[in-house]
Image (cartoon, coloured by chain):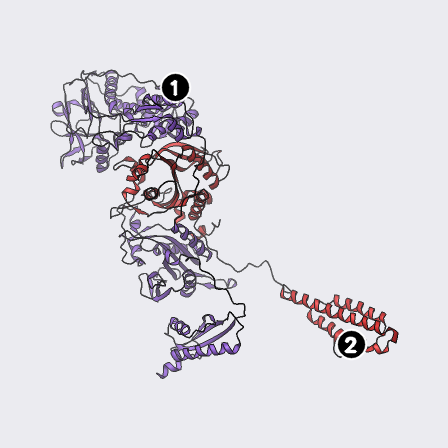
Chain colours: A red, B purple
Amino acid sequence: MSSRATIEAVAEHRQRFDQQLAEVSDPAAWDAVRVEWLGRKRGLVRDLLSAIGKVDADQRSQYGQAVNALRQHVEASLEELQRRLEESAAGSSVQNLDVTLPGRAIRSGAVHPVHRVIEEIVDIFRSLGYSVAEGPEIEDDYHNFAALNFPADHPARDEQDTLFTRDGRLLRTHTSPVQVRTLASRKPPIRIVCPGRTYRNDNDLRHSPMFHQVECLAVAEGITLGDLKGTLEYFVKQLFTKDTRMRLRPSYFPFTEPSAEVDITCPFCQGSGCRTCSESGWMEILGSGMVDPRVLAAQGIDPDRYSGFAYGLGADRVAMIRYGVPNIRQLFEGDVRLLRQVTS
Amino acid sequence: MLFSRQWLGDYVDLPDTEELVEGLTRVGLNVEGVDVQEGDEVLDLEVTPNRPDCMNHLGVAREVAVRFDTELRMPEIAEAERGDAGIEISVEDLDDCPRYVGVVVDNVTVGPSPEWLARRLTSIGVRPINNVVDVTNFVLWEMGQPLHAFDLDTVAGASVRVRRAQKNETLTTLDGVERKLDPGVLVIADADRAVALAGIMGGADTEVKESTSRVLIESAHFHPTVVRKAASKLGMHTDASHRFERGTDPEGCAGAAMRAAHLLAEFAGGEVRPGMVDVLDEGRCWHPEGNLDLDRLQAFGGVEVTAREVERILAGLGYDANRVDGGWRVTQPSWRYYDQEAFREEGEVPEMWPADLYEEVLRVVGFDAIPATLPRISQPDAGSSLTFLADRSLRHRIAGLGFVETISYAFESEEANQSFASILAQADPVEVRNPVSESFRWMRRSILPGLVEAARFNQRYGAEAVELFEVGHIFSVDGREVDALGLVTGGELSTPWDRDRGWDFYAFKGPIEDLLPNGSTFESAELDGFVTGAAAVILGANGEQVGQMGEVADSDLAYPLFACELTVDSVARPEPAPVIPPSRYPAVTADITLTHAADLPWSEIERAVNAQRAEELSEFGLKDRYDGEGVPDGAVNTTIWFRYNAGDRSLTQDEVNSFQQLIRSRLEEEFGWQAKTSN
């Protein structure tokens, strides 16, 4: 290769190098450019340096500087381009994937819808400063009935359809025995939430002999019926929607006085009336009341000084409403086609 | 319970039905439905067991009058003069029957009731029979007092005694069934024999029939518990027993008897015989008393109520309220005595609790009028149940491993109960005495039968693989109730694209090892419910059994299932411990392949490696097993991977080689196939 050994020629070389480099897109082309310009034997940069002897003496120093600048430019540019090429090779580079093919399946697990609801309810109470309390599922008559103001041979017991064990105990019909155990072992102020399995001798389309309750209990000085109402309002708005309205209907439970059933605006029709709520716009969801003074007194808590409220609801029922499960027993079949759908 | 709007209208002015329904609901009588009939509307009310006084039209009308602040109109009832009426009435035990009223009506002509009376009964679903029976039913549904009418000519000796039945005594009741009695049952007897079951049903022999002309009307107060026990023993439930069990009005007996007698005189042509017989426990108090303090009422309710409103409500509900300092001394009406009856001690009625009276006032004021507030408690409650929090984090951890949580019934059939051993030592099952069905008779001792059943359910619906788990209690008759975790897997995701991942013993053991803390071990064992040679007990670090696992022994499966059960305690996350900071120097890996006897347990190899372990050996594990071509019969090739790392330097290959050489020598010496065969 012959080249004119002038400063102008060096500038032209630089232009040509830049053009060549712009067209390089793979390592082979990059290497060809490198050999052409920086090769040890025939490299253009080396040739230009060798040609310094042909340059006029007064321009030699300037020429030498120009060639050195060119060499630095070539080296730096090649290095930069090499880095870029390596990066893109490590990335997508030139593959040809069908990105619409399915990913390889993973099977994610699922927490049971009833437990999701229970956890959510417990979280609402914990945000209000309540703690979680639990107790045994096989209970005795005292904790399940007598201490809760169900006298022996009282018709109120009929409504509980109790399952008894051969050894004289019973399967708890509600989570209220946990309240009794807590009142017996602690001093007010008490605020607890009690989730758990409960059992009744009841098995038809709408009932399962096993179901889940969550109850709360608050006992302290100066607790009012208004406090029960306010707590309930906060609770149903958190659990359902902030537009949910509720009403309290006086009712009867042996362990609360006064007692009230709590209706919320039907979650299916928002209160306008539908088949699920028998066109009433209301859905019964909770039982509640002020703790009966006899229940407090039986555990050594002075009812003249302390008052409290309690309420409970069926977690299965809430899960059925939330996830549209038509039959409670479908919750307990272990059908993964249903259970895997519940991921939130 | 059904109520006729027209009938209610006899005693109180009613608002329109929509307002009436709302008012009844707000005061505690939930309206479950309204049935429009010809010229009437029938309300279906949910009357709670504590309100037998509302199981009749007058009682409901009283609630309406209080709620809407209008007047209650009582029916006209003739004053009763006590006498003997030519009959003899005696009561063996006034505790069983504190009051028994008898009135005789002579010259009755039995026949159909007047149309208005028949229609009243039909509207609420009671079938008219004849004027005598219909009048007793009418008074029951008007005033709440169950009555019974005897044909007096069939009552031997015109005498009636209330007594306990004798052993083996029998009575044929109105429904034609012969009942075998015992002293647990209270009866009405004449001079010869039992003629009625007290508070439940009359007898066939003394029933009013077309030929009857002299009628004895019984209007009594039987003790709730006595009636309840007898009805339950005899398996009977009637309109009368329903009310007696809950508590009727002891002071209403005479009025109800007179009301019925005069209706019979009017509509059956009878003549009321003078002299009402009234056997009464004179000393018994039917009027519990209590104090109501206005300030405390308002504090309890969180609402303002005026003294005038309190007095209006109490008077309307039949309470006597006498002003005392700051409130009232209140006396309960006899038709509400049962609130305290269960707590009566040695005949004394206990004092009412203030809350009993708060309830009465506040339900009429209306819960909707009470402002919503939150409790003013400054500190959070102390401590939460560790079990709940452990279960919760465990459930989410296992769901994160790809398992789906199920909830099974905690009771099962005997066969299921016996199908697996319990992981609790010596756990005898708890039996349910009155199970919903035989398949729900036994409380589970193991969580596995229910889970395996759920897996089978999914197999039936074509699931190609199952990964299930459950967390719940297992029970033993000695009172132990332990929180257990069960897992079951099986099948495979079988498309080549998804890389054919199937479950076998070792695939299942992986997630279980992940759950268990360090130091847990598996020991081969023969276990109920598992395939022999494919089962293990799981031991905690302290050597106690915490679980079991293996292949499920059940030939009736679409594909093999693998099951594991652990106590929740054994897998609960331990207290957080400080981490070991990872090395900043690169790790070096190396393998060793050892040919050894096929029956050598891996745990032996682990033990030998650990015995020879250099500090720099950070991890090792099984890389592969091979027993194909080139491996002698009875032997197997095990390849083990090793990872070396030092915290203070880069390891050289020479160092690693020397560590490996020591391990290799040890393994060859202890287990090498050559060494083995030369022995």
Quarter where residue A90 is shown: bottom right
Residue drawn at x 40%, y 30% as measured from the top left: B299
Q: Is residue B670 visible?
A: yes
Q: Nearer the viewer, mark 2 or mark 1?
A: 2
- Asked if one can make out residue B216 in the rendered structure from this viewpoint, the answer is no
Quadrant (top left/top right/bottom left/bottom right) for the C terminus of chain B: bottom left
Circle 1 sits in a helix, a strand or a loop, which is it?
Answer: loop
* Quadrant placement of the N terminus of chain B: top left
In which chain is the residue bearing label 1?
B
Residue B627, image x and y in percent?
Answer: 42, 75
**In this orientation, which residue lies closer to the viewer: B630 or B323?**
B323
What's under tag 2, amino acid-wise? Arg
Q: Chain of mark 2?
A: A
Disc 1: which residue: B70
**Residue tagged 2:** A46
**B118 sits left or right of B558 in the view:** left
Neighbourhood count class around disc 2 (C-alpha, 10 Å): few under 14, some 14–19, many 20 upward: some
